[in-house]
Image: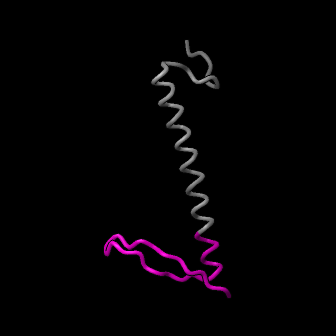
Amino acid sequence: MEKVKFEVFNTKTGKFEDGVLDEEEAMKAIECFRNDYEAYEAEKNIVETLIDMQINNSIHPKLGNLD
């Protein structure tokens, strides 16, 4: 099985350190990153919409009129 070399920042030492994963472990890490990124993007979009609504004192078009 092929090995993947990567660097990780060690917050305790303040230095980058080499790490090695096999291909399966690397694919799992990439999938986890993608899932986290998708959740981050969704949260960011919600926050941006809420900020826009506050700044513009408006109702989001999908919510309709609340009167």
Q: Does residue 24 appear to the left or right of 55 in the view shown?
A: right
Q: Magenta residues, as a range?
A: 1-29
**Relative to 12, does residue 18 appear above or below in the rendering?**
below
Q: Does residue 19 appear to the left or right of 24 in the view shown?
A: left
Q: Position of residue 18 (x, y in %)?
A: 47, 81
Q: Position of residue 31 (x, y in %)?
A: 63, 65
- What colouring method underlies this structural image? one colour
Q: Determine the residue positioned at 53% across, 44% down.
A: 43
**Relative to 9, does residue 65 appear above or below in the rendering?**
above
**Relative to 50, does residue 29 appear above or below in the rendering?**
below
Q: Does residue 47 appear to the left or right of 34 in the view shown?
A: left
Task: Determine the residue located farthest toward the front in the rendered image.
Answer: 15
Task: Determine the residue located farthest toward the bottom in the rendered image.
Answer: 1
Q: Determine the residue positioned at 60% across, 81% down.
A: 4
Whether residue 7 is in magenta: the answer is yes
Q: Position of residue 53 (x, y in %)?
A: 51, 25
Q: Determine the residue positioned at 48% across, 18% down.
A: 57
**Relative to 15, does residue 56 appear above or below in the rendering?**
above
Q: Work out which quarter of the rendered image holds the N terminus and state it.
A: bottom right
Q: Work out which quarter of the rendered image holds the C terminus and state it.
A: top right
Could you say which quadrant of the image residue 9 lies in?
bottom left
